[in-house]
Image: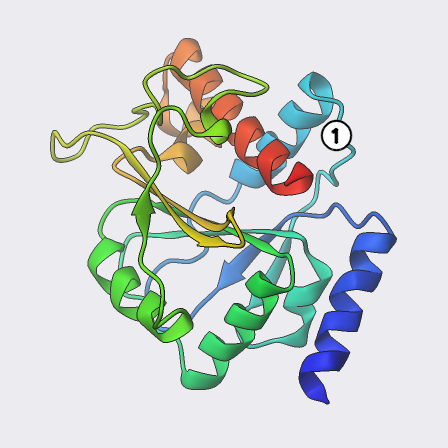
Amino acid sequence: MKRVLLLLIFLSALAANSQELAVLKYQGGGDWYANPTALSNLARFCNENIRTTLEANTATVEVGSSEIFLYPWIHMTGHGNVFFSKEEAGNLRTYLLAGGFLHIDDNYGMEPYLRKELKKVFPDKELEELGADHPIFKQPYEFPEGLPKIHEHDGKRPQAFGIFHENRVVLLFTYESDLGDGWEDPAVHNDPEDVRQQALQMGANIIQYAFRN
């Protein structure tokens, strides 16, 4: 009964054209609150360039809360440890299978913890690397080489991984890229403008994919 109610909440939010983005608050000690200006800047960029109607203000939602179903697109980031309880993992799984979308952007250091916790959410699925030919890299902006590199950490190539449900990516994990840093106010990281534009354009691709697929 609870699952049915949550699904109804989610579908009602979509029917109302709810387009407020949210940051996922999680346990474990990782800094889920990193990049505080990122989503607002991404929302404004998308509204100005791909004709979305996203709210400039972004919400914070906890993994285990029923409020997660009010947001069709949720962003998760951080540098450190991540932990999902059994109940939180189940709630996140229900959200994603109901049509929600989660973008996880490794701000550097969360990857080993995240992979372990995602097995709680989808014990029957694996993260699959997305090739440069995936639709998420093709529109509205073209990225012929796939995920762009925004910040350098370990000299590793940027990678995008997805968890699929019914041939749709429901969870996107961007690694060794740091898109969220590129979305922040220019003065935060002093990124060159062309690098910021790459980050914002890739973010717009993710938004468009999530809302249209």
Image quadrant holding the N terminus, namely bottom right
Q: Nearer the viewer, residue 36 or 108?
A: 108
Residue 75 relative to residue 176: left or right: right
In the rendered image, residue 171, in percent from the top left (x then y), is placed at 47, 52
In the rendered image, residue 55, in percent from the top left (x then y), is placed at 75, 41
Q: Is residue 29 visible?
A: no
- Residue lying furthest front: 166
Residue visible at 32% across and 47% down in the picture: 128
For disc 1, the marked residue is 52
Residue 89 relative to residue 191: left or right: right
Q: Quadrant of residue 105?
A: top left
Residue 92 relative to residue 100: left or right: left
- Residue lying furthest right: 16
Image quadrant holding the C terminus, namely top right
Q: Nearer the viewer, residue 31 or 133?
A: 133
Q: Amino acid at mark 1?
A: Thr
In the rendered image, residue 124, in percent from the top left (x then y), is placed at 35, 70
Q: Nearer the viewer, residue 181 or 122?
A: 122
Secondary structure category for the residue under label 1: loop
Q: Is residue 94 above or below residue 169?
A: below
Residue visible at 60% across and 42% down in the picture: 210
Residue 16 relative to residue 25: left or right: right
In the rendered image, residue 134, in percent from the top left (x then y), is placed at 43, 30
Q: Nearer the viewer, residue 191 or 171?
A: 171
